Amino acid sequence: MSKRIIVDPITRIEGHLRIEVIVDDNNKITEAYSSSTLWRGLENIVKGRDPRDVGFFVQRICGVCTYSHYRAGIEAAEDALGIVPPLNAKLVRCLMNAALTLHDHPVHFYHLHGLDWVDVVSALSADPAKASKDAFNYTDTPMYTGEDHLKAVQKRVGDFVKKGNLGPFANAYWGHKTYKLTPEENLIALSHYLEGLKIQRIAAQMMAIFGAKQPHPQSLTVGGVTCIMDLQNPARLGEYLTKFKEIADFVDNCYYADLVMAGRAYANEPSVTTGFGVANLMTYREFPLNSKEYLFEDGIMMAEDVVAMLEGRDFKTHKIDESKITEEATHAWYKNDAPLHPYDGETEPNYTGLKDAETINGKGELEHSKVVDETGKYSWIKAPRYDSKPMQVGPLSNIVINYAKGNKRVVKVVNQFLKDTGLPISAVPTTLGRTACRMLEAKVVSDNALEAFNSLIENLKVDDSTCTTYDIDKNKEYKGRFMGNAPRGILSHWIRIKNGVVENYQAVVPSTWNASPKDANGVRGAYEESLVGLTLEDLSQPLEIIRVIHSFDPCIACAVHVMDTKGNEVSAYKVNPNSTTC
C-alpha cells in the first residue's frame, strides 16, 4: 500500500519549500511533488516604475543572493537601453560577485546542508587527538583541527547537550543509519561549521568594500558603479585582497578537505550516489577576468551528451538559444497556463488551495493533512522549459559543462578532486557530486578571481571611468535581459520598457528551473525527478529526501511567512506607517 510523506519546510533556515512523496511497500519513492508555498509578486511591483530603480527593488527577491538580483535588474535595463558599462565597472561587479560566491557556497555546505552529512551528536564521542591526526588525511595544511581546538569545540557543543538543548543543531535525525563519517570526522567538520560563521562575516565585509553594505549593496547603477572613492583608495583595494586570501585559505583547507572526506566516506551510500534527476544541463558565462575572457563559459548539454561523456563516447555541447526559453503554469497557481517566453510572461495569481489526505507523520503514524492537488495546481513556482524540456541548473551543470568544454581552470580542480577522493567521473552527476561541484565552483573562483582584481588595477592606471552616460527616449519601446550565473545556477531577468517606465518584468531564477512542478506533459522538474527511485531507511526520518533537495541549495524567498497546516490564521499584525518608533 502506498503512503504519502510531507517535508515542510525543507530548508534549515529559509523556508517556503514543501516536498511531498509517495512511497511503496518497500519505502521506495514512486512519485514526488515540489511546492513553493509563498508568493510575493515582486515582478508586478516593479511595473510602472523607472527602469533605473528596478535593481533596488528586485534585489529584495532574496536576502542571500541579493547581489545577484541587484546586478540582474541593473544589467537587464542596460541591455534594453543599449548601455555598455566601462571595463572598470564590469571588473568591480565581478569582484563583488566573487565575494558573494565565496560567502554563499561555504554557508550552504556548513550551515544549510552540511548537517545532512555530519552527525553532530556523534562528534561528542570522538577522540580529539585522533581527529587532529586524521585531519592530515584530507589536506597537508589542516585548519582549526589542533587537539586543543577540537577539545574546545567538543566542550562547547557538549554544554548544549547538558542543558538539554542542541541550539542550532536541534531537530535533526542524529544517529540515522545513512550517516557515514566517523566520530572524529564529524568533529573535524563540526569545528569547520563553527569557524564558517566567522568566515561568512569576512565575506560580507568583502562585499561591502565596493558595495557599501551587505546584504543589499547599493553601489551599482545603470551605466556602471558608484564606488569611485573606494577604487581610488589603495587601502580599500588592499583590504579586499587581504580578506579574499583569508577566505581562499578556508576554501582550500576546510571546505575542499571536508568534501574530500565526505567523498571517500559516502562513496558507497546509495542515497547520495544516485539522485541525478533531470540530466539536461544549462549554464551561463560568468566572472569576466579581463576585457576578453570569462572564468566560466556558457552552454547546454542534453541528457544523451552527458551520458556519452561519462561513458567516454563522443558528445556535444550546444549554445543557448534564448528564444527557446518559456515558462508555463499548468500546475502553478497562476491564471495563464500557456508556455510564454519571459518577455511576454504573466504573473496573475490563481490560488486553488490544497486537499485532504492521509500522511505519515514524524512518529511514523497515519494522520489527516492538507496535501497538494497532484492533478491540479500545487506550487507558486512556474515550470520553465528549454525547447519544451526541463533543465537542471546550478554548480553541477556549470562544472560539468565547463569540464566537457575543456575549460582548463575547471578541468584542473575536477581531476585533482577525483584523484584525492578516488571517485570515478560517474560520481559527478549524483547528489554527492552536486554537493561537491558547489565546492569546486568556489574553489575555481578562489583560485582565479584575483585575475579580475589584477586586471582592474592595471586598467585603473590608464582609465578611471566608472560609468557610461545615456539617454532614455520616452517615445521609444525597449526590451532587454540579463543572463548570468548566480550561486544556485543560471539567472535571467527580462524587461520591457514603454513610455519611460517598466511595462513588463519577469525573473526566471535558478530555483524556478530546479523546483519546477510538472508541466502540461506531466514531465517533472529537477527536484521531483531526483527523488523518484530513492529508498528511505525510515519513513519517520526522511533524511534522504532532505539531503537530496538540499544539494540543490533551494532558495524560494527571503522573507518568513507563518502558516498553519490546517489552513487556519495564526496571527494578524497592523503596522502604523507613520510611527516614529520601531
Image (tube, helix red, strand yellow):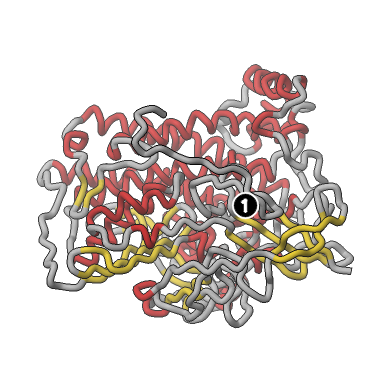
Task: Residue 36: name its quadrant.
Answer: bottom right
Q: Is residue 8 above or below residue 400?
A: above
Residue 178: x and y in percent read 79, 48
Q: Residue 18, how many percent across, how many down?
A: 65, 57
Asked if residue 151 shows in the view, the reply is yes
Label 1 packing within 10 angstroms: few (<14), some (14-19), many (20+): many
Q: In screen coordinates, is 39 left or right of 368?
A: left
Q: Is residue 115 above or below residue 433?
A: above
Q: Nearer the viewer, residue 136 or 570?
A: 570
**The N terminus sits in image quarter:** bottom right
Q: Is residue 506 above or below residue 548?
A: below
Residue type, label 1: His
Residue at horizontal 20%, vertical 37%? 231
Residue 157: horizontal and vertical position, in percent? Answer: 69, 24
Q: Is residue 435 left or right of residue 120?
A: left
- Residue 259 shows in this picture: no
Image position, residue 556 (x, y; %): 53, 54
- The quadrant the C terminus occupies is top left
Image-based side of 448 in relation to 271, left or right: left
Q: Quadrant of residue 292?
A: bottom left
Q: Residue at x 72, y 46 (%)?
A: 265
Q: What secondary structure is marked by label 1?
A: helix
207 or 127, nearer to the observer: 207
Of 184 and 540, the residue lying toward us: 540
Residue at the location (47% across, 74% down)?
A: 327
Q: Would you name the residue on which mark 1 appears?
A: 550
Q: Residue at x 46, y 56 (%)?
A: 40
